[in-house]
Image (cartoon, grey):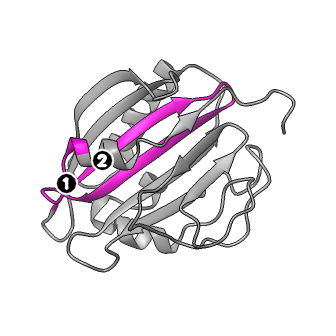
Amino acid sequence: MIARLAGFGTLGLAIGFAFALGTAARAADSLSFDDPGMHFTAPAGWTRVDQGPAYGGPSDAQADAPAAVFVYHQSQNDQRTIIIEIQPFDGTLDGFEGHHESELHSNNQDATFVDKRSKTTLANGMPAYFLRISSGSDAGHFMRRYEYLVYDGKRTIVVTYAGRQGDFDDKDAQAAMSSLYVVAYPRAHP
């Protein structure tokens, strides 16, 4: 996951290491990401970061790479990113949430705090966790990120909205991620 590659202070650098992870054909400038189990469209004004060819499915060798990356106000002080990560998983949503929090704390060198954790549902009724996470960065900035954690029966999906603390709030993050739609991954699909 991207958390393994970088703490909040270097999140922008992590985008440069991103590779494709999705099954839908798409244009590099598309604001949508679709695969057999999910749909997401970034808000107007965002830009998709081209990551090369798409991978073949949940068992693909590129499973640690982000599925999609979107950026807002790239290279500006208030830059924000939305990162979609998809991983094969055999378990439960609650089990994944606990594992994810543990991984956040152990993989970040800076101080990382889960400020808010709530079990919720997406707009289509799919169960999810919503996390608000704060962290200090190498440059002395405080970073904030919001995450939706979802389990589709075959994979975990993490949609992260991140940027410098103070540039946005809970409502901004939830609005930017409001198009997230996840269904049970089709059993017949690889």
Q: Can residue 178 be seen in this view?
A: yes
Q: Residues within 10 Å of mark 1 (few under 14, many from 20)?
A: some
Locate residue 90, reporting x and y percent.
66, 25
Q: Can residue 64 be seen in this view?
A: no
**Image height check: is 133 above or below 188?**
below
Name the one closer to the observer, 3 or 71: 71
Instruction: Specify the farthest residue to the bottom.
Output: 75
Indicate the quadrant where residue 105 lies.
top left
Query: Badges 1 and 2: C-beta atoms under 8 Å apart?
Result: yes
Locate residue 120, reporting x and y percent.
38, 22
Quadrant holding the C terminus: top right
Q: Residues within 10 Å of mark 2 (few under 14, many from 20)?
A: some
Residue 123: in magenta span: no
Label 1 sits on residue = 168
- What is the distance, in whole Å, between disc 1 and disc 2 at their CAs? 7 Å
Q: Residue visible at 33% across and 52% down?
A: 108
